[in-house]
Structure formats: C-alpha cells, structure tokens
Amino acid sequence: MSATASTPIDAQAKNAPASGRLFFLNLSAGLILSANPDGSDLKTTINEGRKLPDGLALDVAAGHIYWTNMGDPKRNDGSIMRSDLNGKNMITIVPPGGTFTPKQLQLEKKTSKLYWSDREGMRVMRANLDGAEIETLVDTSAGDSRPGPDPRKRCVGIAVDTDGGKFYWTQKGGHHSGLGRIFRANIQVPQGQSAENRRDIELLYDNLPEPIDLDLDPVNRTLYWTDRGDPPRGNTVNRAPMDPEAENGKEPEILFSHLMEGIGLALDLKGGRMFITDFGGSVYSANLDGSNRKTLLFAEGNLTGIAYAEVPSVDRGEASRVIEVPEEKHMVAAISD
C-alpha cells in the first residue's frame, strides 16, 4: 500500500483567506476540475487519464482531495486516490483491486474514515484516511459473484450521519426499471452479525427511477439525492425526510428537473444552496428548495462527482498547474451507470 500519513497544509495556506470553490470530475477524460461557485475561473487540477473517476471528497483542513476511480467495471481494479488541493503529491490510498467499482465517496472527519459504495462489488465499504483497515459494512450480493449481474443489488450513493449513528446508500436498479431504493443502517455492524446478514438495515424509499448520489442536511433531517432515471420523476434532484416513519411516509419532493442524467450532488448548507452535475456535461446551482436555478457550466464532458468547500486562496491559485498521469494501456472506455 502506497498511502502515507496525512500531510498538514503549510503555514501560508493556513493564514490565507478562504473562499468557496467547486471541485468536480470529468469521467470520460479522467479530469479533476475546479471553479468558483458561479462557474468562473474554471481550471483543470489533475489529468489522470481514462480511469473513470466517480466520487469526490475534500479534507480542507489537511489540504487533500480524495476520489474514486471505477476502473474497468468488468475487472476488479477499482481504486481510491489522494492529492493535495492543488493536485500535487498524488498517491494511491486503496490500490487497484481493493474495491471493485467504487462510486460516491464521503469523508467522515470525526472518526477519520472514508465511506464509499462499490457498484459491481455490491457492497458499502469504509477505510481509514490512509487506506488502512478496509471494511465491508453491507454486502448485498446474496452469493452472486463479482462483478454483480443484478442492478438491483448495485450500491451507488453514500452519505453518513455521524451524530445520528447511521449511513445511507442507494441501490439504483436497472435502466427504465423503477426499482431504485434508498437504505440506511447503523454505522457499526451489530455484534454477532456481519455485512452479509446484518438485521438493522432499513428500507426508506423504494420504486424510485434510478437514485444515484446522496447528501444530507442533518439539522433539518432531510435527505437529498440525484436520480438519472426516466422523467418525470427521473433526471431530477429530490429531497425527503431522513426519518420517514416520523413524517408519516411523506413522499419525496422533486426540486430540480430536466437534467441530462443527473449524477453529482453537493450541498452548501451554510450558503443555503446545492450544486449538481449531470452526465450531459453541465454544472448547476440552486437554492435548497430548488429555486434560483442556474446553469454554471455546460459541455464539459461526462461529469460525475462534485464537492464544495471553503478553500484557502493559496491552494485555489495553484490549481491552474495541471498534474498529468500516464494513461494505463489496459483501461477501456465504459459508460458510468
């Protein structure tokens, strides 16, 4: 394993003023891009080649970007990477084969853990920030071999409610099937149970078009997600209670529609807004209730994960230096599904 200990940002960055910054992934070109929250000052931070990056998480205090590479969905070669916010010092955290097809990624600071969903691996996983102690928290395979052939078992989105002691994930179902679901379970596997047979899993929402990425507003106990399925309920951003039983089964609310296969989602709870990417190549913003919709960027390739943070300006300024990584010859093009 090539992971190293977390490197703190230097004194210059610590003392620099912070401002909002978006980071997002171009799956088709293998790029990490960044921009201001209004879409201006677009920069390429990393050009990694066609390793199919999908999930993205930021650790601003340590000055790091983490992201998942799906690799070839038919091979067991998914990985998780880390770099500085400016793209320098890139290392492998979870090596190829440590996870099958990692998708959305979340960083949980209180326990210093990375959480992710593994699509063809049919599981939810986590590890330390240095890649150590990889665990499977949920295994939906029910004995199926990997790569998983049943899209109903494929885990895609992930969100973590640390204070509530739960994590949430999506299982997308197939295209045009209307069999997507959202689940949650306790952060800790119950004693005497395993990822395969744990009995604390709750089904929160089902018969969804095709739910993808998740984010949480824990104060208002609200769950947000993108859906890339068929209209009118698909190609949308939705929200619903994190605790549906307390809301008497309140139906999900569509906030944002007419996406071109909605994928990435990031909430700026302090600013009362959300940022969305779609596979058609656009980045959008809107208020948390879906009002004030704006198209920030378009025709930027097949976009996947997105993250927002207040970033020191010294790191933002250095993001114009593109870090390029040689493309692996065995990699084949594949569509994110």
Image (spheres, rainbow, N blue to C red):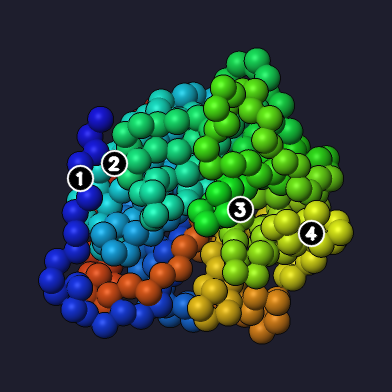
Question: Looking at the rendered structure, which numbered label has been put on residue 321?
Answer: none
Q: CA distance from mark 4 to mark 2?
A: 38 Å
Which element is circle 3 on?
strand
Tag in front: 1 or 3: 1
Count of marks, rendered view: 4
**Crowding at label 3, few (<14), some or many (≥20) Cα neighbours within 10 Å?**
many
Q: Which residue is mark 1?
A: 5
Q: Looking at this rendering, what residue extends furthest in the front direction?
A: 191
What percent of the width, then of the height, locates residue 229? 76, 51
Tag in front: 2 or 3: 2
**Crowding at label 1, few (<14), some or many (≥20) Cα neighbours within 10 Å?**
few
User: Could you tell me which residue is drawn at 51 percent across and 54 percent down?
Assistant: 162
Left or right relative to 250: residue 111:
left
Question: Looking at the rendered structure, which numbered label has been put on residue 246?
Answer: 4
Instruction: Give residue 292's quadrant in the image.
Output: bottom right
Q: Which residue is mark 2?
A: 130
Residue 31 appears in the rendering: no
Which element is circle 1 on?
loop
User: Could you tell me which residue is drawn at 72 percent across and 41 percent down?
Assistant: 202
Tag in front: 4 or 2: 4
Q: CA distance from mark 4 to mark 3?
A: 23 Å
Left or right relative to 200: residue 84:
left
Question: Looking at the rendered structure, which numbered label has been put on residue 213?
Answer: 3
Which element is circle 2 on?
loop
Q: CB atoms at circles 2 and 1 under 8 Å apart?
A: yes
Which element is circle 4 on?
helix
User: Could you tell me which residue is drawn at 61 percent across and 16 percent down?
Assistant: 145
43 up-or-down from 223: above or below: below
Q: CA distance from mark 1 to mark 3?
A: 29 Å
18 up-or-down from 202: above or below: below
